Amino acid sequence: MATSKPAGCDDVPASDTTGMARMSDWFDGVPGIDTARVLDILARSIDCRVVNIEVRRRRDLEKHAGRSSTQFILEVVSPQHDDRRRLVFVKRSAASRSERQHYAALKGRCNIPDCLGAVNDSEGRELLFLEYVPRQVFLMNPAHLAGVLDAIAAINAADLSPTHDRARDAEALVAGSGGWTAALDLIGDHLMAAEVSREHVARIRRERRQLIDAANSMSAILHSATWRPDLNDPHQLNFGMREQSDEVVTYDLQGLGYFPGFFGVANLVLDLAGGFPSRAWLRGVSECYLERYNRRAGDHVTLGQFRQECTIGLRLGRLRKLAWRAAAASGSSAAARLDTREVRNHWNQLLRLAQAQ
């Protein structure tokens, strides 16, 4: 394998059978990975040869709701070079979908961590090796929120044509809308079963009809909407801050694609504000985002246009969340697996959006 050779390594052998043997400790449960390629990626991450590194599995990252990948931190150390070291973020995808192509397409244009390399295991699942960004982002911190808005604006203004087809992404999303009615039926049944008052049951039945009508109208709305590169499911835990520069980056690009209605920022802000924030707060966040987006995209989206487009993105976001919850709960014990408070919250938000149309 070809790697750069730092000074002082001339007398070191070019094999590392000990390192190869320890791979099972680092990647327990990951079948059939190319150990030589993994070691090469880790060695190059600190500008060393394979023989000069030690690798330690530091810790696993806890899964949050919606996260399907396995994530952990490795520490790469070179004792021969004054204990030169680096923490590497490793992510094993839950499906055979590549994320590395997105990092390559956005490199130098968006706020993303360095992609150090990737390999596939024998199940076709990707192991992605990324720069570890240690600091958490807290969206209630105005400086952190501004950084997140800038990171999303950079993606919204990017060109994904090398890896994505706008029309194909739109067709796939519209095709998936066929399951929204069934999801609303299931969740409506769940909410009615949780009520004891006939009046409340009748109200939910009326709401369900209204929401199904709104869902059925979304297909035409999506066809006429403006589509931009965006994040599939932006979440506070998918952003981090670099230690030295305070730059906020996003490291969840697996669902990157074209979405309508400023989908990512609209749903992130809605979730952050707990539903429907004050007009003054929402205006301030919107203006902060639009300044960044218009500058990066060379666009001139007005605040009024932004609000109209966000309504589409918000309706789509609530419909998808309800559909995800319904799909996860499908089966004989669906009612037991649905969180009544959570789905009622999404239901109410979607209802308000439909009534404001």
Image (cartoon, helix red, strand yellow):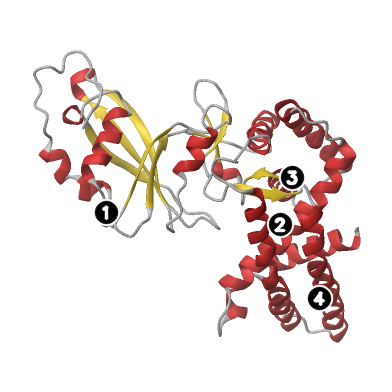
Residue at screen point 60% across, 41% down: 161
Q: Which circle's residue, 1 or 2, is located before the other in the chain? A: 1
- Amino acid carrying label 2: it is Gly
Which residue position is annotated with label 1? 28
Q: Which circle's residue, 3 or 4, is located before the other in the chain? A: 4
Numbered tag placed on residue 249 in the rendering: none
User: In the image, which is nearer the foreground, mark 1 or mark 2?
Assistant: 2
- Amino acid carrying label 1: it is Asp
Numbered tag placed on residue 317 in the rendering: 2
Is the residue 61 above or below the residue 29 in the image?
above
Residue 235 percent coordinates (x, y): 61, 47
Numbered tag placed on residue 208 in the rendering: 4
Q: CB atoms at circles 1 and 3 under 8 Å apart?
A: no
Residue 65 percent coordinates (x, y): 55, 57
**Within 10 Å of the Cα at label 4, are there few (<14), some (14-19), or many (20+) other Cα atoms?**
many
Which residue position is annotated with label 3? 262
Secondary structure of residue under mark 1: loop
Real-space Cα distance between discs 2 and 3?
11 Å
Real-space Cα distance between discs 2 and 4?
17 Å
Q: CB atoms at circles 2 and 3 under 8 Å apart?
A: no
Quadrant of the image containing the N terminus: top left
Quadrant of the image containing the C terminus: bottom right
Q: Which circle's residue, 4 or 1, is located before the other in the chain? A: 1
**Within 10 Å of the Cα at label 3, are there few (<14), some (14-19), or many (20+) other Cα atoms?**
many
Q: Kindly indicate the quadrant of the structure image that contains residue 40.
A: top left
Residue at screen point 51% across, 55% down: 67
